[in-house]
Image (spheres, rainbow, N blue to C red):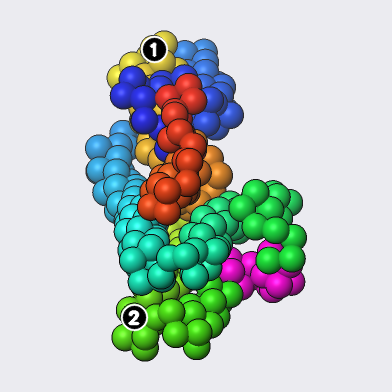
Amino acid sequence: MIVDARPRLTKIVHDVWKPLLVLFVWDCLVTGFYIWSPFRAPELPLTLFGTALALFLGFRDNSAYQRWWEGRVLWGAMINASRSLARQARNFLPDPDARDLKRSIVLRHVAYVNALRCQLRQHVDFREGELLRFLSRGEAEPALRRTNVANGLLDGTGRRIEDARKRGWIDSIQQASMESVLVDIANAQGGMERLKNTPLPNQYRFFPQLFTRLFCFVLPIGLVETLGIATPVGSTLAGLMFLAVLQIGDDLVDPFADSVHDVPMSAMCRTIEIDLLEAIGDPAPEPLKPVKGVLW
């Protein structure tokens, strides 16, 4: 997520320079043809076309931002539920009998959120390494054999809570309370997976690109009569605005795309790690800092 308040015009140009270059070349061809031939460009209702396209792109960008914001809300719910789980493990499980189990539940959950982050970003190669940072090979292996590794870790945590009840360390009411938190965590994970696995409908992706390119195609034809030799500059600048708005929707549509625009899952996983380790009295790492204005 970009946290730098300074505008990044260079980043926008970098994202749209290819279609912008094509538009500039087309603008120059139209302008040259207009100057060196008796051709007279027709009057096109560019204002009407541009207004309709702006409304269409604005509606699409709003839909994309809603997806991004929902992803952020789900991670906020994950942070809150993680803190609740650690607090319950600390307060419900007795010392010193269940001290190891208490620490195991906390470390398993830190491994869980990092595994979930890797799954959402499709970093399958890094997932095992993230688990082994917090768990032993024997404890991580059952989850690694599962199709959904994060869900396997969550199931294992539920079984350990059930084992604590059987040992008499917690009662059924305390178990139900902890299970309720696990349900909240599973619901947040399900919402994230829904966003990741359900793309924006094809009409929202195809038609905005088609209409934007059509508008850029007719733009110099409609402007050349008024701007003359300055048409490439005016048309390219106008096209830049529409192409940038189109790119904004593409950037936000997947909140877990592992780009500078996605939800800062690494930073939020570190927040969970810090809060949970401090809850059981273990040393915690420092929060992640932005790198060149980007918080990952």
Residue that carries the numbered disc 1 in the rendered image: 230
Could you classify mark 2 by the number of other residues whose Cα lies within 10 Å: few (under 14), some (14-19), or many (20 or more)? some
Q: Does the magenta stretch include residue 144?
A: yes
- Kind of residue sitting beneath label 2: Gln
Identified by mark 1, the residue type is Ala
Q: Does residue 36 appear to the left or right of 5 in the view shown?
A: right
Question: What residue is shown with label 2?
Answer: 174
Q: Give the range drawn in magenta.
A: 140-153
Name the residue nearer the viewer: 266 or 235.
266
Q: In this view, does 271 lie above or below 149?
A: above
Q: In which quarter of the image is residue 3?
A: top left
Residue 270 lies in the magenta stretch: no
- Residue in front for this viewpoint, 269 or 264: 269
Sequence order check: which comes first, mark 2 or mark 1? 2
In the foreground, 212 or 271: 271
Count neighbours of disc 1 (C-alpha within 10 A) and say few if under 14, some if 14 to 19, many if 20 or more: some
- Give the number of callouts: 2
Say whether residue 186 is visible. Answer: yes
Magenta stretch, overall SS: helix
Q: Quadrant of the N terminus?
A: top left
Residue 251 at least partly seen: no
Above or below: residue 179 compared with residue 94: below
Residue at image coords 70%, 58%: 136
Identify the residue at image location x=38%, y=76%: 178
Q: Where is residue 157 in the image (x, y as percent from the top left)?
A: 53, 73
Q: Residue shown at 53%/68% (left/top)?
A: 101
Which element type, helix, strand or loop, lies under badge 2?
Answer: helix
Residue 38 locus on image (x, y percent): 46, 19
Measured in 3D between alpha carbons, the distance from the residue under mark 2 to the one under mark 1, in whole angstroms, is: 74 Å
